[in-house]
Amino acid sequence: MLTYTQVVLRSFRISGTLLVVNGLAVILLKGIIHPLELFGDLLLVETSLLFLLAGIVDFGSSLGFAQFRKLIGGSKEAFTLGLRKEAERRALIFVASGVTLFIIMVFLALEF
């Protein structure tokens, strides 16, 4: 079971990794595209992908989807509230990462 401290630390790790990758992309493409525009666009795309991923993780553990898997694929995995809560916490990691990147993007937009 993930604790909220673990969720926050994992979300900061994901956000930090994405910021480093964005920085490297900006450095590599410096002469082609304006650096701040590229950085902002990358943050926007990554934020939206993180929110979509969180929704997919959360939806994949819902009761309706578990019944659908059982109907279509003959899945033997039963729905439990414990698995549902764990999936919600895993989804929370991606939501917190997306919110962190969104806040950084807003501060960059306000600064310039």
Image: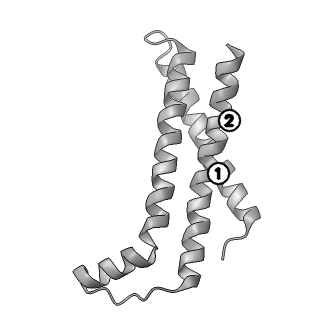
Q: CA distance from mark 2 to mark 1?
A: 11 Å
Instruction: Tell which residue pokes out farthest to the top in this image.
Output: 31
Looking at the image, residue 75 lies above or below residue 49 = below
The numbered mark at residue 103 is 2
Name which residue type carries label 1: Ala
Looking at the image, residue 93 lies above or below residue 89 = above
Residue 36: percent from left, percent from top:
57, 17
- Determine the residue positioned at 46% across, 45% down: 49
Of pointers 2 and 1, the one earlier in the residue sequence: 1
Residue 24: percent from left, percent from top:
54, 28
Looking at the picture, the colour scheme in use is one colour
| Quadrant of the snapshot with the C terminus | top right
Residue 29: percent from left, percent from top:
46, 18
Label 2 close to label 1 by CB (< 8 Å): no
Read off the residue under disc 1.
96
| Quadrant of the snapshot with the N terminus | bottom right
Looking at the image, residue 28 lies above or below residue 65 = above
Label 1 neighbour load within 10 Å: few <14, some 14-19, many 20+: many
Instruction: Tell which residue pokes out farthest to the right in this image.
Output: 5
The numbered mark at residue 86 is none
Q: Is residue 13 left or right of residue 60?
A: right
- Secondary structure, mark 2, is helix
- Secondary structure, mark 1, is helix
Looking at the image, residue 103 lies above or below residue 29 = below
Name which residue type carries label 2: Ile
- Determine the residue positioned at 46% across, 13% down: 33
- Determine the residue positioned at 45% across, 74% down: 62
- Determine the residue positioned at 55% across, 25% down: 40
Q: Is residue 33 left or right of residue 107?
A: left
